[in-house]
Image: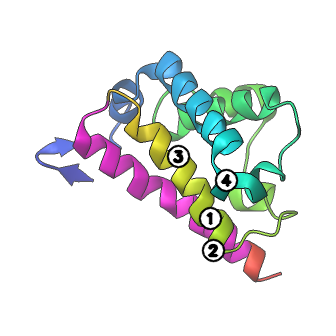
Amino acid sequence: MEVNNTIYGVGDRSYKLAGELPGIIKLVNDFYMNMDTLSKAKNIRSMHSKDLSDSKIKLSYFLSGWLGGPKLYAKHFGSINIPMAHKHLKVGIEETEAWLLCMKKSVDNQPYEDTFKLYLMTQLRVPAERIRMLSNNQ
């Protein structure tokens, strides 16, 4: 995708713009902090264990590879199909939008270019919607 003559999603460009692994870890920590504190996220927070340590690592590692960086999730946990990994959860529009709200607040808190923030949120909506669609088809 090209936004304002800047190509995202090619090679490791998005990974680098996200601050590589340290930047992704910061994004993920902010995301889970939002999930812990936003009232609209109460339902999706309840879908996670009390200790978010494993969730933080898994999301950070997933995003690393998803953004074109090292495929850390596959290296440590094996391959993943995001919708199937969440098939045990009841995910509707409310849950999808709560997840995206937590992520948007996290993305907005990062020192990314505005166009990269827009790109990232557009791309993150895709797996979020796929999870919801799988949940609704069960």
Mark number displayed over residue 39: 4
Look at the picture and state if 91 lies above or below 101: below
Quick one: 49 or 13, which is closer to the camera?
Answer: 49
**How far is mark 4 from mark 2, CA to CA?**
16 Å
- Residue 15 in the figure: left or right of residue 8: right
Where in the figure is residue 114, as x and y percent of width and height? 24, 41
Where in the figure is residue 21, as x and y percent of width and height? 52, 20
**How far is mark 1 from mark 2, CA to CA?**
5 Å
For the record, the magenta segment spans 112-134
Image quadrant where residue 37 sits: top right
Helix, strand or loop at label 1? It is helix
Foreground mark, 4 or 3?
4
Residue type (three-letter) at the residue carrying disc 1: Thr
- Residue 123 in the figure: left or right of residue 74: left
Mark number displayed over residue 103: 3
**How far is mark 4 from mark 3, CA to CA?**
14 Å
Residue 8 in view = no
Foreground mark, 4 or 2?
4
What residue sits right under mark 2 in the picture? 93
Where in the figure is residue 118, as x and y percent of width and height? 31, 51
